[in-house]
Image (cartoon, rainbow, N blue to C red):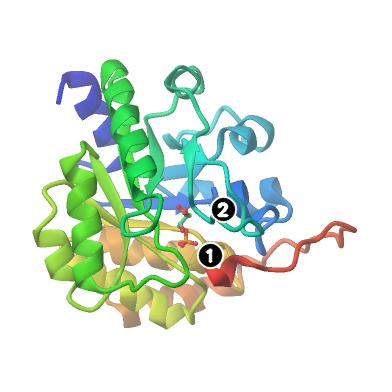
Amino acid sequence: MDWGMRNRLSKIIKPKTGRTVMLAVDHGYFLGPTTGLENFRESIEPLIPYCDTLFITRGMLRTCVNPNIEVPVMLRASGGTSILGKELLHEGVTLSVEDAIRLNAVGIGYSILVGADWERDTILDFANYVNEAERYGLIAMAVTAVGKDMAKDARYLALASRMAAEHGAHIVKTYYCEGFEKVVDTCPVPIVMAGGKKIPELDALTMAYNAVQAGAVGVDMGRNIFQSESPVAMIKAIRAVIQENATPKEALGVFKENKGKFRKPAHRKSGVAAKDDSAKV
Ligand code: 5RP
């Protein structure tokens, strides 16, 4: 890894702690106006000061995020299918490396679908994307996407994560599972945990705690933050777990202490409000 890549990686994974709190708000690329992100700008603005990296699509970055933000940005670079289609996650390239650089991204995220009919397409496209990203020193994060009928166990997630690293991923984003140590120990690049569908706050904090205890460098979490009854209190609690080694109980204290202070923005009712499909993935 050259100087530029090491520098970009240090923007994502904080050198002081070796950890990162990535805020994932890219869901609209296949889910549309996901619950909690209907009014995107209002929802994410108060969260930005508490994350180490923002994971987002280029369209929402350009239209809804103040360019003066200090946190680094990673851009979703794959897509092409929706929750309504038959081939969920049969993704291809949606962002050029040039545009990622123009938008001053430190890296990109790309989904691979190991074990599904179209695994070959997504893995070859990802490997080609890494070739391009490396030419310009961009960090490539592989997202080990899991279709709704696929098992999220250690055997499968270790296979997918290791394959992602073998094909050149610099960071792997994967789901938490029992035996997560195996996933981390057999993957030579840093792992961040995806949050998955919304669960009670203490459960999400416990899952994040267990993931970093097992060796993950942090989280790339979305719904368990922005769908919480108090998203700011929740990101602060997650931050306590990841960056300050708080226990789940201590972090729940941070959540409780802050939830009265930071209220969720009230969304206007919109005629096009989507039904929440985010629990299906
Ligand atoms: C979808 C993604 C999302 O960013 C990812 O799922 C993280 O969000 P959440 O914590 O809501 O699962 O990459 O493919």
Q: Mark on residue 150?
A: none
Which residue is at a point 24% across and 40% down the rendered structure image?
A: 169
Q: Residues within 10 Å of mark 2 (few under 14, many from 20)?
A: some
Question: Which amino acid is tagged 2?
Answer: His
Q: Amino acid at mark 1?
A: Arg
Q: Are marks 1 and 2 in contact (CB under 8 Å)?
A: yes
Where residue 56 sits in the image (x, y, percent)? 52, 42
Residue at disc 2, secondary structure: loop
Tell me residue 121's x, y (percent).
Answer: 38, 41
Q: Give how far across and how far down residue 40 sits, in percent.
A: 68, 49
- Above or below 22: residue 251: below
The residue at label 1 has a CB less than 8 Å from ligand 1 = yes
Give the side of residue 126 with respect to residue 166, left or right: right
Can you identify the residue that label 1 sits on?
A: 223
- The residue carrying mark 2 is 27
Q: Quadrant of the N terminus?
A: top left
Left or right position of 260 against 133: right
What element does badge 1 sit on?
A: helix
- Eyeballing the image, is 28 above or below 208? above
Front residue of 18/84: it is 84
**In the image, is the residue at mark 2 within 8 Å of ligand 1 by its beta carbon?**
yes
